[in-house]
Amino acid sequence: MVTIKDVAKHAGVSVATVSRALNKNGYVSEKAREKVESSINELNYYPNEVARSLFQKTSKMIGLLLPDISNPYFPLLMKGIEESARENGYSVILGNVEEGSKAGDNYMRLFAQQNVAGVLSAVEGTLSHHHPMPIVMLDRVLEGDDYAVYTNDVKGGILAAQAIIDRKPGKVLIIAGPKSVPGAIDRLLGILSVLNPTDVEYEIFETGSYTIKEAETTAKEIFDLYGKMNSIIASNDLFALAVMKEAQQRGYQIPRDIQVIGYDNIPFSQLVYPGLTTISQPAFQAGYQAADLLVRQIRKDTISNKRIKLDPELVVRDSLRESEE
């Protein structure tokens, strides 16, 4: 493994000069800097970020906790985070926490050992223990979380339900997300605020998680349990797509027999046939703003808006019937 001493020897300068060139701290002549950069490239030297951060008492690493990276929504979130972090000179360390596992606590200890500057988390319960490092919650946000970026899921639920009742809803099935996820509760509240004042008949099926595996199992279970429903409001796109697949396999036509609306607007929602109508969450924007908020917290900037709420939008494709308006 190449060390800073190897770089100094190769460049013909002192270790202190290499250190100043790497950290951009103190005077280094242009000629010496060029020698150092040339040696770094030739030797494929990579600085030990943990050691450097401990020495400087500052870090350029951010920890990120996501609940399920197999769900296409979270890579979109991560893309925004990485772009914002990179623009601010930070790298991102990812921790994937399976739904319902305790791995989040282990990752938080690991992040502390790695001397990360702060943490972004979409895993509920991250703030249940005291952590000295700055933390910004995103997506799965509780009322008491001080720094947070999230979508207005009540509004998203309202948009989804309104889109359904405007299009000959018939009997509606709501596939609600797990109660442990704050956003799922808000989406359901929004949906019910629209349906309850009407005479539309509906059923609620609560899922245990948002995973792909459960989406496939749930789709089969729904048709076995309820038979044919006229309209289905799914709490995320994975469940909506699984329902569409199962419906078509059972001979139903979408949207003629069953209309379906999802939530998230993942890339696959526009690639299937018919295209999935969905509620679009600004995932990239949420990730970008969350990373920016964390960096400002790390820098101890004055922050007036610590909780950022983003608005969702209805994206109409082909899985809903024509509007009656």
Image: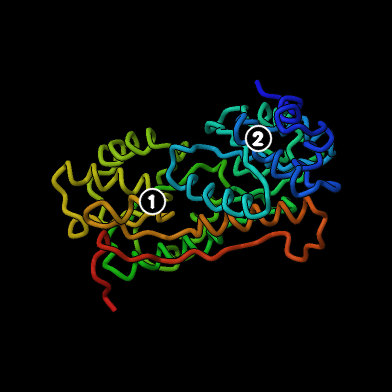
The residue indicated by pointer 1 is 234
Please tell me whether residue 305 is drawn above or below residue 48 in the rendered image: below
Disc number for residue 98? none
To which quarter of the image does residue 225 belong? top left
The mark that comes first in sequence, 2 or 1, is 2
Q: Tell me, what colour scheme is on the image?
A: rainbow
Relative side of 22 to 197, left or right: right
The residue indicated by pointer 2 is 40
Q: Quadrant of the N terminus?
A: top right
Residue 305, position in %: x, y? 73, 64
In this view, the residue in front, 164 or 90, is: 90
Q: Secondary structure at mark 2?
A: helix
Relative side of 120 to 199, left or right: right
User: Can you tell which of label 2 and label 1 is closer to the viewer?
Assistant: 2
In this view, the residue in front, 173 or 8, is: 8
Q: Residue at x 60, y 44 (%)?
A: 122
Q: Amino acid at mark 1?
A: Ala
Residue 231, position in %: x, y? 29, 57
Residue 319, position in %: x, y? 26, 59
Q: Secondary structure at mark 1?
A: strand
Q: Amino acid at mark 2?
A: Ile
In this view, the residue in front, 106 or 32, is: 32
Regarding residue 44, the answer to whether it shows in the image is yes
Q: Residue at x 33, y 60 (%)?
A: 277
Number of marks? 2
